[in-house]
Image (cartoon, rainbow, N blue to C red):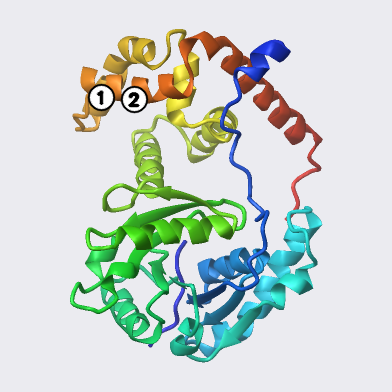
Amino acid sequence: MEPIDCPEAHGAHAAQHAQPMQPMQPVQPTQRHDSRRAGIVGAGSIGVAFAIVFARASWRVRLFDPDAARRTAAPAEIAARLEDLARFALIDESAAQIAARVEIVDSLEAAAAGADLVQECAPERVELKRALFAQLDRAAPPHTILASASSFLAASKFVDETWPGHARCLVAHPGNPPYLVPVVEIVPAPFTAPAATTRAIALYGEAGLLPVRVKKEVAGFIFNRLQGAVLREAYCLVRDGVASVDDIDTVMREGLAPRWSVIGPFETVDLNTRGGIASHAQKMGPSYEQMGAERGQHDPWTPALVAQVGAARRAALPLDRWDARVSWRDRQLMRLAKHRKALPPAED
């Protein structure tokens, strides 16, 4: 087997009535789960990162890679990342205590033995993932959740429905690195048992991550489809001579990213226009449709679709709380600006 490495509120009264979902932060588990065991297959960057996630939550971790050089290198990489986390006060134990929970093992079977969850972190190749999951289905106890860190491939592409344990297989695609970007996309296949999906969500939550259930299999899931839309347009803007690479990065870093680090794209436009989503779509929808048409896309914001998104936003934020929420957003951006201003010069 080849080496495994995965790519990649006005006053007090208003504030009381405008308690939003807080901006996502790297999560440290509030409860320790020292009886939990995770197996990780693949000691590349994502495998090492997952080892840190689970060990930080007091899980016992067994990490395997078929490449002996990766098995040798992984402990030092884990230690270095944990030291960085300790430097920024992002762990509440010593780096050595957390690292001691990670055991490097010499076989896939040893990684899977007794595990509550096995995280596969292999390249995006159907044949390799199919071979690994066939081995894992034979090696792992019946209760073990088998999860792939796949970035684009759905589980139904590499899991055979004739396998005895196919119903416990799914995708758990992380942000990178997951110990700092805590969202993990849980993507069941059509044949994944609902109980397995529910258990996977609970286990990743216990480990300090923020699971998001993807309702149907689609290539790239949510994370990479959103990222891909931005990248496609960025490449086109460079190709068409509209902007330089550096200027596009500047617009994202200093323009879109600060807001998106506090609120998502729907809430951003909901708060940008008095009247919320419905008003924004009425005013701006045709312009966005025109921009899409320039790229050969035809994805209009139909009245039904706008009503669906608007209903979700109004359930989260009634319009009588809109002003308070806008003030909250601005204060979050002020906090972010203050933090960035206080940062020392960038280090290598």
The CA span between labels 1 and 2 is: 6 Å
Residue 173 visible, this orientation: no
Residue 334's place in the image compared with 216, above or below, is above
Quadrant of the frame with the C terminus = bottom right
Name the residue beneath numbered marker 2. 309
The x and y percentages for residue 58 are 66, 68
Q: Nearer the viewer, residue 146 or 107?
A: 146
Residue 117 visible, this orientation: yes
User: Label 2 near label 1: C-beta < 8 Å?
Assistant: yes
Q: Give the residue displayed 55% in from the left and 66% down from the top.
A: 50
Q: Nearer the viewer, residue 49 or 348?
A: 49
Q: Nearer the viewer, residue 95 or 209?
A: 209
The x and y percentages for residue 104 are 59, 85
In the image, taking residue 126 as reference, residue 5 lies left or right, namely right
In the image, taking residue 198 as reference, residue 116 lies left or right, namely right
Residue 25's place in the image compared with 312, above or below, is below
Q: Give the residue displayed 33% in from the left and 69% down from the top.
A: 168
Q: Quadrant of residue 273?
A: top left
* Disc marking residue 30: none
In the image, taking residue 70 as reference, residue 233 lies left or right, namely left
Mark 1 crowdedness (10 Å alpha carbons): few <14, some 14-19, many ≥20 = few
* Disc marking residue 305: 1
Q: Give the residue displayed 45% in from the left and 68% down from the top.
A: 6
Residue 58's place in the image compared with 294, above or below, is below
For badge 2, the amino acid type reads Val
Quadrant of the frame with the N terminus = bottom left
